[in-house]
Every structure is written in structure tokens, then in C-alpha cells.
Image (cartoon, rainbow, N blue to C red):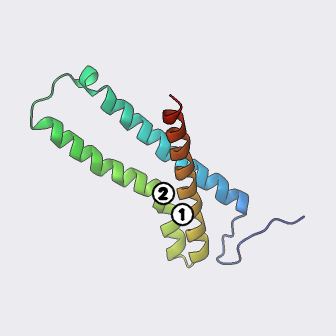
Amino acid sequence: MSEVRFRYGPQNMKKSEYLLRSFINAAGVFVYVALIAWLGFNSKTIFGEAPSFIAPLFMLLLFVVSACITGLLVLGKPILMYLNNQRREAIVLFSVTLSWLVLFLAIIATALALR
């Protein structure tokens, strides 16, 4: 049985490669968000009481950096594929990555509901 491949572009990917790449990207976002959540949860223990100006500055800069990192993990490869005229593949990769993130969110919401 032959593997199904998308027909566009010089670097065709198998469906299993889309699943794996999108899972790795979504897992990277999950791990990064978990680390930032842990940092936020333990910030008083780690940093102590921060001066009034430093804490909001740190949080806003962390927000901007986090948006860049998660944006790169979710959108980086799909944008490159889209710009290389692999539009269908780019949309599929983005959609599957987003689906993994929604699945992770549903698992966490279920775990919270069952507590």
C-alpha cells in the first residue's frame, strides 16, 4: 500500500509526517506554556516581592517573548510552506497543529473538571 502524499511543492510530506511535525510543535507550545505557568505560580518564591515598576515590566516583556515563541512554533513552518507555494500543505499543517492544541486544552479542562 502506498502512502498518500499531497501533490503540491517539491517537498511533499506524508500524512504521518504532518501528524508528527504538528504534534512536536504543539507539544513544544504546551511545554513552554507549562514552564511559564509554573514560573508565574512560583514567582513570589523565586523572585520575592518585586518593586512596583519591575513586576509589570517583566510580565509585559514575558508576554511579548511568549507570543513570539509560540507564534514561531505554531506558524513558522506553515508560513514558510505558504510562501513556497505549498498553500494546501501549509493550511493542513497549521490546522493539525491547532487541533493538537485544542486536544491538549480539552484534556486539561477535563482533568480540572474531575478534581
| Residue at x 65% of width, y 52% of height | 20
SS at mark 1? helix
Residue topped by disc 1: 94
Task: Say if residue 13 shows up in the picture.
Answer: yes
Residue 32, located in which quarter of the rendered image?
top left
Tell me the kind of residue under disc 2: Val
Q: Residues within 10 Å of mark 1 (few under 14, many from 20)?
A: some
Q: Amino acid at mark 1?
A: Phe
Q: Residue at x 15, y 28 (%)?
A: 50
* Residue 9 vs residue 1, the one in the foreground: 1
Circle 2/circle 1 CB separation < 8 Å: yes
Mark earlier in primary sequence (2, 1): 2
Indicate the quadrant containing the N terminus: top left, top right, bottom left or bottom right: bottom right
Residue at the image position 53 percent from the left and 52 percent from the top: 102
Nearest to the observer: residue 60 or residue 109: 109
The picture quadrant where one finds residue 71 is bottom left
Alpha carbon of mark 2 to alpha carbon of mark 1: how far? 7 Å
Among the 4 quarters of the image, the one containing residue 106: top right
* Residue on which the image places disc 2: 74
Q: Secondary structure at mark 2?
A: helix
Residue 95 in picture, x, y percent from top left: 56, 63
Q: Position of residue 104 (x, y in %)?
A: 54, 45
Q: Residues within 10 Å of mark 2 (few under 14, many from 20)?
A: many
Q: Kindly tell me whether residue 25 is visible in this rendering.
A: no
